[in-house]
Image (tube, coloured by chain):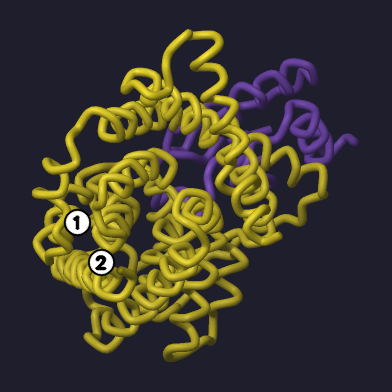
Chain colours: A purple, B yellow
Amino acid sequence: MIIKILGPGCKKCEKLEKNTKDALETLSVDFELVKITDSIEIQKYGVMRTPALVINDKVVVSGRVPKTKEIEKLINIATPEN
Amino acid sequence: MLTFINDQLFRMVWLNDLAGWIVQTIFKLNLDEKLGQSLQFFIFDTVKIFILLSVLIFLMGIIQSYFPPERTKVLLGGMKGWKGNLLGALIGTVTPFCSCSSIPIFIGFTTAGLPIGVTFSFLISSPMVDIASIIMLMSFFGWKVAIMYVLVGLMLAVVGGTVIDKLNMNDQVQDYIRDMEEEDIFSEELTFKQRIDFGIEQVKEVAGKVWPYILIGVAIGAGIHNWVPQSYIQSALGNNNVISVFLATLIGIPIYADIFGVLPIAEALFSKGVPIGTLVAFMMAVTTLSLPSLVMLSKVVKPKLLGIFILICLIGILSIGISFNWFLI
């Protein structure tokens, strides 16, 4: 599973990254975490508000920092086995 | 009844009395003396701003969660002429703004084919006029000034955007943006709980970021309020002269703050007899034209359009300041 954090590196982006890592730890799934900070690259995902969370090339959250629990749910939905 | 609500809820007269009581009983200072008055001003203004800030940012966060820029883009699509400009300006008032979000918004609007003037109407009104500034102004200067501020701010956004449209500035967008294709914009439907969470997060973020500026602003305000002689300020910014508006605008541009940090200074200057137009010009210059946001904007538009944008804002702010001084005194 490839997980991407989109954002220029503001406080909110760091918080999203932390919450995501926490969620991944609890779920213990294989993943690759990529950070995208370039605004042109970010635009390619159709994101107008950062930070955004992308799971397997699909944007699931934009413009807010979801709690760890919510991210766990989002990852579960995106995981094919479930 | 209206006066009572205005005094107690927006001007918070009760809090001023409470601050006075604290100064007298706890600090044992006399309210007839300068030190006591400064301290009262400092306590009153700091607490008042933090109360207003928390309530307003929370409510705004919830309202804003209904008007994300993704939706704005769809709403504005297909709007032409002054109606597009007006809608752009109006939506700007309910959209959160920070200079860091201006680039993705600009790119998103432009690749969607929105007229560049509509985008600029949005970009002018978004930092200048918002719900928080309306209520803050009501609290500090009363509802007349607040309504006038909103009306002229929206006017400037509509006129500014229309002028940029008429000047045919489409080639002044940076080339890399014109080569971009429009992407499907992601949007999600939030639950009410998520909106509440968003509002709380916004309060934490904004309060965590602006509290030093508020303390500095209030301290400067308290200093002006009680220690700087009225004649000094009068000779520099008073006299109802045109130069004072110029001066206030020029001082305001490099300052990067929001309405919460600027108001205590403006309030103190007002009590020293600086005319309201001069102060409105100052506040508009601080919120709309700041160095960080101009740097951001220069990444998406070419220098000529950036120059025109600055010029339009300058002329607009100056004429608003001068006419406020003319009509409201």
Residue A10 in which image quadrant: top left
User: Residue B321 shows which numbered tag?
Assistant: 2
Residue A4 to residue A28: above or below: below
Who's the residue at 30% across and 75% down the image? B327
Residue B299 can be seen in this image: no
* B113 vs B36: above or below: below
How far from the left and from the top, in percent, is residue B255? 24, 42
Residue name at image x 12 percent, y 66 percent: B242
Residue at the spot 55% in from the left edge and 36% down from the top edge: A5
Which residue, as the protein is rendered here, is positioned at the far right? A82
Give the letter of the chain under mark 2.
B
At 71% across and 23% down in the image, what residue appears?
Answer: A30
Q: Do the residues under discs 1 and 2 have CB atoms within 8 angstroms? A: yes
Q: Position of residue B65 (x, y in %)?
A: 67, 54
| Pointer 1 residue | B249
The amino acid on which the numbered mark 1 sits, given as a three-letter code, is Thr
Viewport quadrant of the N terminus of chain B: bottom right
Q: Does residue B30 appear to the left or right of B185 in the view shown?
A: left
Q: Earlier in the sequence, mark 1 or mark 2?
A: 1
**Amino acid residing under circle 2:** Gly
Looking at the image, residue B51 sits to the left or right of residue B81; the answer is right
Q: Is residue B186 above or below residue B316?
A: above
> Secondary structure under badge 2?
helix
Frontmost residue, B146 versus B255: B146
Q: Position of residue B84 (x, y in %)?
A: 48, 83
Chain to which mark 1 belongs: B
Q: Left or right: where does residue B213 sit relative to residue B193?
A: left
Q: Where does the image place residue B217, in percent across and percent down from the top left?
A: 34, 33
Q: Which-is-in-front pick, marks 1 and 2?
A: 2
Q: Which mark is residue B169?
A: none
Q: CA distance from mark 1 to mark 2?
A: 9 Å
Q: Mark 1: which secondary structure?
A: helix
